[in-house]
Image (tube, rainbow, N blue to C red):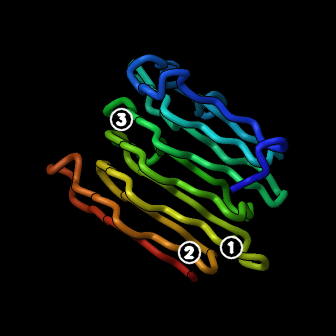
Amino acid sequence: PPNPTDSIVFKSANNDTALVHINWPASATTGNNSIVNIRGAKQITFRNLSFERTGTGIYATIFELDTTSNIKLLYNNLVLPVSTVTTANSSHIYSLDDRTEDSTLIIGNVMTGGTNGTWFYSNPDRPALGTIIQNNIIRTSYTGVFVKHHDAISINNNRIPRFNAAATDFYGISLENC
C-alpha cells in the first residue's frame, strides 16, 4: 500500500456504500464518458462509495484511467452499478490504449450492468506490472475482466456471472499478451 502521507483517499466516513452515492448521466457523445477521469495522478484510493451512470445515453464508463505515468490506484470495496447500457462504450474501469498503470488494485467491489467490468490496455513496449483484481463480483453483458500487455497480473477469487443472458458473446476473463 502507498505511504498514507503521500496518498489521496475518497471514502465513506461510516464505511457504508449506501451513504455516499455519486451519479452522473450517461452521455450521448464520447466527450463526457466517465464519472472519474484520472490523469497523471498517483496513489488514489476510492473506498466504500457508490457510483452510478443514469439516463439513456450509450457512453457510461465509471472510471477512466488516462495517464502515461506509472500510476498507483487503489479501488477498495466499491459498489459500481452502471446503467443498463449494453454497447461497447460502457465500462466500470477503463484504461486507454498504450497507457501503463502499475500496481493497480481492484479489490472487493461489486460491478453490475454495462458492457465491461475492467478493460485494461497497457503499452506493449512497457507492460503494466503488478495489477491485482480480486474478491470482486462483476456482472456485465460482454467482458468481466479484459487485460492486454500486463506482467505479473493476479486475477483471483472473483465472481463473474453474465448480466445479460440475451447477449450472444460473453467472456468472463480475457487475457491478451499477459
Helix, strand or loop under label 1: strand
Mark 3 to mark 2 CA distance (whole Å): 28 Å
Instruction: Name the residue beneath numbered marker 3.
Output: 85
Horizontal and vertical percent for residue 39?
Answer: 79, 42
Could you say which disc has been placed on residue 40 in the image? none
Q: Spatial distance from mark 1 to mark 2, Cα to Cα?
A: 7 Å
Mark 2 is surrounded, within 10 Å at the Cα level, by few (under 14), some (14 to 19) or many (20 or more) other residues, namely some
Q: For numbered disc 3, what is the local secondary structure? A: loop
Tally of marks = 3
Count neighbours of disc 3 (C-alpha within 10 A) and say few if under 14, some if 14 to 19, many if 20 or more: many
Quarter placement of the N terminus: bottom right
- In the picture shown, does residue 174 fall above or below 5? below
Residue at (15%, 49%) from the top-left corner? 166
Q: Residue at x 82, y 57 (%)?
A: 68
Q: Amino acid at mark 1?
A: Leu
User: Foreground residue, 109 or 37?
Assistant: 109
Q: Position of residue 51 (x, y in %)?
A: 47, 28
Secondary structure beneath dot 2 equals loop
Q: Are marks 1 and 2 in contact (CB under 8 Å)?
A: no
Q: Residue at x 45, y 70 (%)?
A: 155
Q: Amino acid at mark 3?
A: Val
Mark 1: few/some/many CA within 10 Å (<14, 14-19, 20+): some
Give residue 32's quadrant in the image: top right
| Residue farthest to the left, as pictured | 165
Residue ID for mark 1: 129
How many angstroms separate mark 3 from mark 1 (CA)? 31 Å
